[in-house]
Image (cartoon, grey):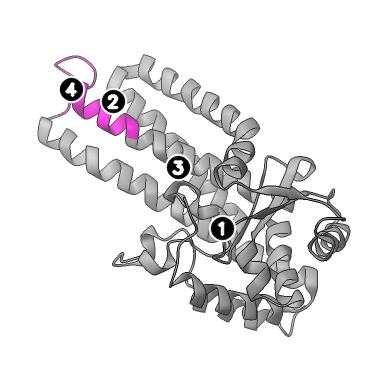
Amino acid sequence: MEVVKTVFLLTLLTILFVWIGGMIGGTQGMVIAFLLALGMNFWSYFNSDKMVLAHYHAVEVDERSAKGLYDIVHRLSNKAGTPMPRVYIIPDHVPNAFATGRNPSHAAVAVTEGLLELLDDKEVEGVLAHEMSHVKHYDILIGTIAATIAGAIAMLSNFMYMFGGGDDRDRPNPIVMLIMMFVMPMVASIIQMAVSRNREFMADEGAARLTKHPEWLQSALMKLESYNRGGIIHEATPQTAHMFIINPFTGKDFSFSNLFSTHPSTDARIEKLEALKGRV
C-alpha cells in the first residue's frame, strides 16, 4: 500500500509541474516543463549523492579505520542481499544518519560522530538497518526526485506570477495567479512530505525484518529524538532533511500540523515497530 501511495504522489507532483508549465506557456510550456522535469531527475540521479556527502563534510572510512561500523554495514548488506555500500562518518556531534545513492550498486551510508557516541552497538545496527532498507528500495532517489520537482514547482509558480501565463485572453485573473503563487508550492510541499513519511515507515519495517529486533531501532529513535530537540547538525538544510533518520530540525519544528514534516512522529514510528514484534 505504501508503494502505491508513493507512486501516486510522485505522479501527482509531475502532473502538477507540467500543468503549471501549461499555465505559463500553453502546450509548448507543458512540453518544456516535462523536458525540464526529465532533465532535473537525470541530474539528481547522477549527482545528488556526491553533493550531499560533500555538503556535510563526510569522510569515507574502511575496515581499518572504523572496523566496528564497517562490520555492521557489511553484515547488514549480506542479510539484505545488496552490494556493500560506501561508509562515511560526518564530523558532527549531533547524532543522526542518512543513506544516499542512485541505486544499491552506487550507495553510501553516513553516520555522525555523535550517533556513534550516543548509541550502543545494537542501536547502531538498528539505525543502519533502516538506512540499508532505504538503499534496497531506492528510497533516497525517490525522495530526491520529489524534493527536486517540489522545488521546481515553487520556482515556476513565482515565474508565472511575475511574467504571467499564455496570451492576454488565456492569462488567469491576477488575484487567482497570486493565490496560485502561494498555494501551488504549498501543495507540492505537502505531497513531497507525504512521500518522505511513507518511505520512513517502510524503512522502519525493513529494519525490523532485517535485524529481527524492532526494539533496537525503537530505542535508537527515542534517544535520537530526545537529543535532536536540543541541537541541529551543522549546515543542515531543509532540502536534505528528508534524508536523515530523524528530522534534523526536530527542535525547531513549530508547524501547526504534521503536513509539513519530512518524517512521521517518532511516537507513531515506535508504535508501528511495536506492532511488528510478534511478526518478525
Q: Which residue is mark 1?
A: 244
Judge depth for marks 2 and 1 and give the one in front.
1
Q: Earlier in the sequence, mark 4 or mark 2?
A: 2
Give percent across and percent down for residue 103: 72, 42
Instruction: Count residues near mark 4 (Cα–Cα under 10 Å), then give few for <14, some for 14-19, many for 20+.
Output: some
Q: Which residue is mark 2?
A: 23
Kind of element beneath mark 1: loop
Among the 4 quarters of the image, the one containing residue 249: bottom left
Q: Is residue 274 left or right of residue 31?
A: right
Q: How many angstroms separate mark 4 from mark 2 (CA)?
A: 8 Å
**Residue 170 vertical position relative to residue 241 in the rendered view, above or below:** above
Q: How many angstroms separate mark 2 from mark 1 (CA)?
A: 35 Å
Q: Earlier in the sequence, mark 4 or mark 1?
A: 4
Residue at 51%, 74% in the rendered image: 227
Q: Earlier in the sequence, mark 2 or mark 1?
A: 2
Give percent across and percent down for residue 75: 87, 63
Q: How many angstroms separate mark 1 from mark 3 (CA)?
A: 24 Å
Q: Which mark is residue 12?
A: 3
Among the 4 quarters of the image, the one containing residue 212: bottom right
Q: Which residues are magenta?
A: 155-172
Q: What amino acid is found at the position of numbered circle 3 in the picture?
A: Leu
Among the 4 quarters of the image, the one containing residue 22: top left
Q: Which residue is mark 4?
A: 171
**Does residue 126 show up magenta in the picture?**
no
